[in-house]
């Protein structure tokens, strides 16, 4: 399971917090958690997924900021979709260093 490269749990009505343990999937390059009922904040442990290329968290009940630990992903291309999140908050300092990075659905 640690060699998993794509995880698509979208459209399943999963609820609760995003598990910190997803950060252990260091070979993960695509993570789709969109269109569920997830709440809480984006776990900083996702920053350990150094191969992460695509991340979609849209259409959930997430709150808070995009964690500073995500800035560690700056050497790779990453697509973060946070549209339709509750109160996205601010982007932590350092997340501006995510290059090249596309953060969509984020209102400043």
Image (spheres, rainbow, N blue to C red):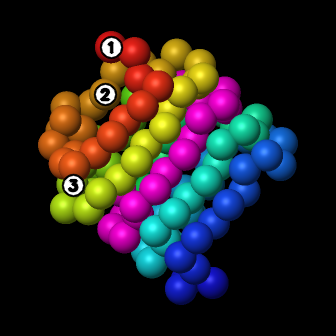
Q: Is residue 105 left or right of residue 10?
A: left
From the top left corner, tell me how far across and down residue 28 is, in percent: 49, 71
Closer to the chain start, of discs 3 and 1, is 3
Disc 3, disc 1: CB below 8 Å? Answer: no
Q: Dot 2 lies on which element?
A: loop
Q: Is residue 64 visible?
A: no
Disc 2, disc 1: CB below 8 Å? Answer: yes
Which residue in the protein does label 2 denote?
Answer: 91
Q: Dot 3 lies on which element?
A: loop
Q: Is residue 69 visible?
A: yes
Find the magenta span and give its range. Answer: 47-63
Which residue in the protein does label 3 denote?
Answer: 74
From the top left corner, tell me how far across and down residue 16 is, in percent: 73, 41
Residue at position x 41%, y 23% from top? Answer: 106
Front residue (pair 10, 44): 10
Q: Quote the CA–CA distance across marks 2 and 3.
A: 14 Å
Front residue (pair 43, 30): 30
Residue 108 numbered mark, or none: 1
Q: Is residue 16 left or right of residue 107?
A: right
From the top left corner, tell me how far across and down residue 33 is, in percent: 64, 49
Q: Quote the CA–CA distance across marks 2 and 1.
A: 9 Å
Residue 8 numbered mark, or none: none
Residue at position x 54%, y 46% from top? Answer: 56
Q: Nearer the viewer, mark 2 or mark 1?
A: 1
Q: Quote the CA–CA distance across marks 3 and 1.
A: 20 Å
Crowd tier of the residue under label 2, counting other residues whose Cα lies within 10 Å: few below 14, some 14–19, many 20 or above? some
Q: Residue 51: within the magenta? A: yes
Closer to the chain start, of discs 2 and 3, is 3
Q: Residue furthest right?
A: 13
């Amino acid at each position: 399971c640690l060699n998993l490269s794509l995880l698509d749990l979208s459209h399943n009505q999963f609820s609760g917090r995003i598990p910190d343990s997803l950060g252990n999937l260091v070979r993960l390059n695509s993570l789709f958690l969109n269109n569920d009922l997830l709440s809480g904040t984006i776990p900083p442990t996702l920053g350990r997924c150094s191969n992460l290329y695509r991340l979609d968290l849209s259409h959930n009940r997430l709150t808070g900021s995009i964690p500073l630990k995500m800035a560690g992903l700056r050497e790779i291309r990453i697509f973060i979709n946070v549209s339709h999140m509750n109160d996205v908050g601010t982007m932590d300092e350092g997340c501006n260093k995510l290059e090249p990075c596309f953060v969509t659905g984020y209102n400043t």
